Image (cartoon, grey):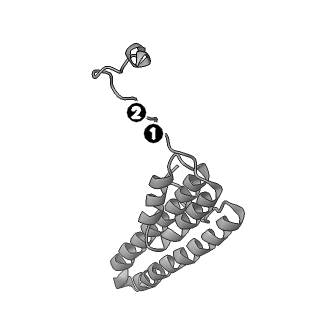
Amino acid sequence: MLDEAITPQPSASAAPVQPETTAAPAAPVDERTGVLVAHLSGLASFFGPLIVLLVYRGKSVVVEREAKEALNFQLTVAIATAVLIVAGIVLAFVLVGFFLLMLAWLLPIAGVVFAIVGAVKSNQTGAFRYPATWRMVK
């Protein structure tokens, strides 16, 4: 009873102590999964690698690097496909445009193939660089 009277009680005006909210580093298993998801999520569009990049930013340097690489590649494929479609429509009256329109449909197929190759290679070695990629996101 004497101890209760001597022990100071926290005042009501004192703010509660908040724990620090720093991101915990990802475990190696989570990194491998994150790298795999970063590359395979590009099968749908460039939004998949973007989401992986935003989720793992600050948690894992490896996943962040691979998500940026996959995002850059998917953005390059999307931009190149759009340019080929527009150029194909504009040049369709010269008959060259039909060739460009056929190429525009092959580019996303190559994007899917490279996304699968990137997922497999990065899962084995930890890193993969896509060929002919405009690296917009650094």
Query: Quadrant location of residue 84?
Result: bottom left
Q: Which residue is mark 1?
A: 21
Q: Residue at x 44, y 35 (%)?
A: 19
Task: Classify the position of the N terminus by image quarter.
Answer: top left
**x and y, in percent, of residue 138 in the image:** 53, 49
Q: Nearer the viewer, residue 100 or 2?
A: 2
Q: Quadrant of residue 28?
A: bottom right
The answer to whether 70 is drawn above or below residue 26 in the figure is below
Instruction: Mark 2: give few (<14), some (14-19) or many (20+) Cα within 10 Å.
Output: few
Q: Is residue 112 left or right of residue 120?
A: left
**Could you classify mark 1 by the number of other residues whose Cα lies within 10 Å: few (under 14), some (14-19), or many (20 or more)?**
few
Which amino acid, mark 2? Answer: Gln
Q: Residue at x 61, y 69 (%)?
A: 119
> Does dot 2 land on a helix, a strand or a loop?
loop
Q: Are marks 2 and 1 in contact (CB under 8 Å)?
A: yes
* Residue sticking out furthest to the front: 1
Can you identify the residue that label 2 sits on?
18
Gap between marks 2 and 1, in whole Å?
9 Å
* Residue at point 48%, 62% (across, down): 49
Q: Nearer the viewer, mark 2 or mark 1?
A: 2
